[in-house]
Amino acid sequence: MIRVQQENFDIGAEIEGLRADRTDIGAIVSFTGTVRDTAKGATISTMTLEHYPGMTEKELERIEAEANERWSLQGSLIIHRYGPMKPGENIVLVVTASAHRQTAFEAAEFLMDFLKTNAPFWKKEEGKDGGEWVDARESDDVALKRWETAEKVAE
Amino acid sequence: MIRVQQENFDIGAEIEGLRADRTDIGAIVSFTGTVRDTAKGATISTMTLEHYPGMTEKELERIEAEANERWSLQGSLIIHRYGPMKPGENIVLVVTASAHRQTAFEAAEFLMDFLKTNAPFWKKEEGKDGGEWVDARESDDVALKRWETAEKVAE
Amino acid sequence: MSIKLLYFAWVREKTGLGEETVDLPGDVQTVSDLIAWLRSRGPEYVSAFEQSDVIRTALDQTHVSHDTAIANAREIAFFPPVTGG
Amino acid sequence: MSIKLLYFAWVREKTGLGEETVDLPGDVQTVSDLIAWLRSRGPEYVSAFEQSDVIRTALDQTHVSHDTAIANAREIAFFPPVTGG
């Protein structure tokens, strides 16, 4: 399941929703991305996320489908917010549920690595010296590369 | 922080407690291990976790300290339950908070890999054919090995 | 051929537009051709597409490279490398 | 030397005891010596320590190998490979 929304989300409620009444799950991994109050030494007062409505949903669905092809998951969830946010607030949530922990961990990392490099979101950080668009991190491209040769994980 | 307890825990509340009022966190990873209703094809009605009071706490503290030496974490938490549990219930929770996602993911996996092979807990699965102690999984020893050569991650 | 163009993040700020609908000249076949044509339209486009190699493109909401043929696309978006998550 | 012995999981079920305090003979120097001595104490110990290589040991709540000297340990625990998490 994927959701793109302006409002905040409740991590605990989302996890409980995904696992509700299931007894075949052995491992649940959640990743939450949050707004940090500093960037390159400068203090950030607001982080604004712009996105591409329509394409965002398509990309997140594609990435989620790809993860479910590669791994045997009992459930998966991606929520990504847009609009202005304050330091400490949630930006993104990824949850994966599987029979075994390695599967849940790998799938969550895969979802984040692909989301970081493919989902059409752009961050602008605002501080006392005005706003600045965040540069893409080279380490995110490196993180993506490790999945290129990865085979589907056996259960 | 570590806790060993019989009662259940609330994943969302634990995550919120760890991050409370912090604005220097960029990534929070949680791992929850839960009771599955089947093992080797047999249906499980109850899973009972025995542990070694005193040593359990020492081992979890040692493992958590080791993770905090290897990675720069803004926070970490391990909660492990003992006693009888039903399928679908929580067994263990690990939460890590860091500035960057790779750090939080790696530290959470490290904590789980070490906990799985070092923390003195033993699972007994009970079904209609009586109870059986769970065998240690070879894959857990393999998972542990990858940390042997791992250097401290640069920030 | 009439087509919808979308601009995001600093590409949007530099062009001064979120979106526009344009009629493409017949010799604009690929994304690269389109970028070259856009740059001929004024200084704000020159500025937005100055470093065209860092600009990412989506054709009908799918990531494509600059040598992709536009063909019958209905919308084309230009934006910097994404930075969500 | 008086020492507390603890047994967990199926080691506990096989010995029939969670813990006991014993006086060790002077020639019991290492964990291996202790296991050999325990096996001489009755069929329930023979059964519990039958495959002594799978038995894990903690000396004063720290994992140790079977060739470790007992020295002045106050408690020694025997258990199968752990299966928590």
Image (tube, coloured by chain):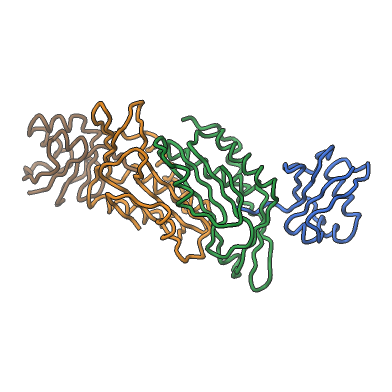
Chain colours: A orange, B green, C brown, D blue
B37 and B77: which is toward the camera: B77
Q: Position of residue C28 (x, y in %)?
A: 11, 42
Q: Quadrant of the C terminus of chain C?
A: top left
B138 and A121: which is toward the camera: A121
Depicted D58 relative to depicted C16: above or below: below
A118 and D17: which is toward the camera: D17
Q: Position of residue B39 (x, y in %)?
A: 60, 65
Q: Position of residue C66 (x, y in %)?
A: 22, 40
In the image, taking residue A142 as reference, residue A98 lies left or right, namely right
Q: Residue at x 38, y 55 (%)?
A: A77
Depicted D34 relative to depicted B45: above or below: above
Q: Position of residue B10 (x, y in %)?
A: 49, 54
C65 and B30: which is toward the camera: B30
The image quadrant of residue D63 is: top right
Q: Residue furthest right?
A: D26
Q: Residue at x 79, y 45 (%)?
A: D75
Q: How many marks?
A: 0
In the image, taking residue A109 as reference, residue B78 lies left or right, namely right
Q: Residue at x 59, y 35 (%)?
A: B149
